[in-house]
Amino acid sequence: MSLETLTDLCTPWCVHVAVTLRVAEHIDAGAGRVEDLATVARCDVHALRALMGQLVSKGVFEEPRPGCYALNQASRELMTPGARLGLDLEGVGGRMAHAWATMLTFVRTGRTAYRDVFGGDFWDDLEANPALGRGFDELMGMVGHGAPDPRIELSGGWDSVRTVVDVGGGSGLMLAALLQSRPGLQGILVDLPRTAGRAAETFREYGVSDRARAIGQSFFDPLPPGFDLYLLKKVLSNWPDAEAGMVLRRCAEAARPHGRVVVIGGVGPDGAPVRMAIDILLTGGRERSIAEFRELADRAGLEVIAVGRQAAGRYVVECRPAL
């Protein structure tokens, strides 16, 4: 792959702008001429022609006649709900796009520079801007990731598990899927009030409202105690070591004496490749090797009892409170 290809910033930004302007939707509605497209998209015709020329050259749209555009498979994908959420510069997609410009500071310091650009940290930004928060929840939920896979293998199986707490479980999709697949299970979702408030709808859709409820609180505060299993799915990678350790400590406190803590996401095998990702630029978190996780868990009062890649493809770590 050429250096020119690797350093092309033009095409990704053109895609973001096209999604923000709903160019594909306007063409689909009949505005194929650049003049008509500029009118309905409310933008400059000459600048739009340049944007479309770039995208056509990369195979994103077709140009059957000069200045007239048509959709192809690539441009139709721009109309999907996930693309709209993830690429729209006026929504949460814009936060993610502009966060890439903070990478130099992040690499130099190891700390997110999100606050420098947007005036507050990522989670505070979502709380202060409800539309952004809703967009993020949807992107992390069914729209962005599809239906969750409830297959989680536990040492000793699920027979002894009657209750589960989904810590930082968003709008409740994973918990709902777990309960739907295991009729004897009951559960609680813990997340910030804005997000937890959306869980009731999820529980109704999955038909588990009688066995699930949501608590709106920070997972840095004490968690509901005495449950059989505490699930952390894609939570720890969103936080630096100090905060990730606190979450694990809260889980250990609540799980004592006989509960378990299951971690999915954010932990991988020793020696696995580590790559830059938008998550760590937004939040300052990090992926951890199993050796690094063991140290973090040990300080939090947890003992790792099982680890490995499971049939569903996920790397899962199972812990119990240390004696």
Image (cartoon, rainbow, N blue to C red):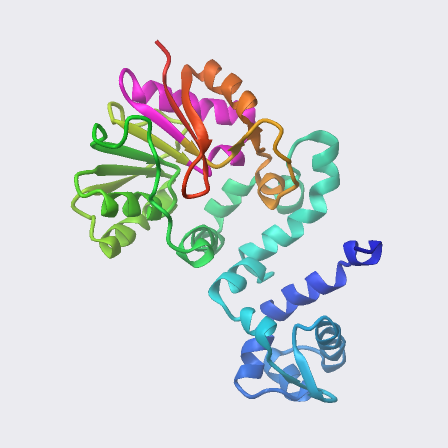
Q: What is the x, y in percent for residue 117? A: 66, 45
> Residue drawn at (45%, 50%), measured in percent from left and top?
140
Which portion, as a residue range, is magenta? 233-262
Q: How many labels does the image show?
A: 0
Going by the image, does 13 lie left or right of 320? right
On the rendered image, what quadrant is the N terminus found in?
A: bottom right
Quadrant in which residue 214 is drawn:
top left
Residue 210, compared with residue 72, is above or below; it is above
| Residue reaching furthest to the top | 323
> Residue drawn at (42%, 37%), measured in percent from left and top?
310
Q: Does the magenta stretch include residue 277?
A: no
Going by the image, does 25 lie left or right of 191? right
On the rendered image, what quadrant is the C terminus found in?
A: top left
| Residue reaching furthest to the right | 3
Q: Does the magenta stretch include residue 252?
A: yes
Q: What is the x, y in percent for residue 184? A: 17, 39
Say which of 100 and 146 sits in front: 146
Say which of 294 and 198 sits in front: 294
Q: What is the x, y in percent for residue 200? A: 26, 50
Say which of 248 and 185 sits in front: 185
Q: What is the x, y in percent for residue 219? A: 39, 31
Residue 32, compared with residue 97, is above or below; it is below
Residue 219, compared with residue 2, is above or below; it is above
Say which of 316 and 117 sits in front: 316
Q: Main secondary structure of the magenta part?
A: helix
Quadrant in which residue 112 is drawn:
top right
Quadrant in which residue 45 is drawn:
bottom right
> Residue drawn at (54%, 82%), measured in percent from left and top?
28
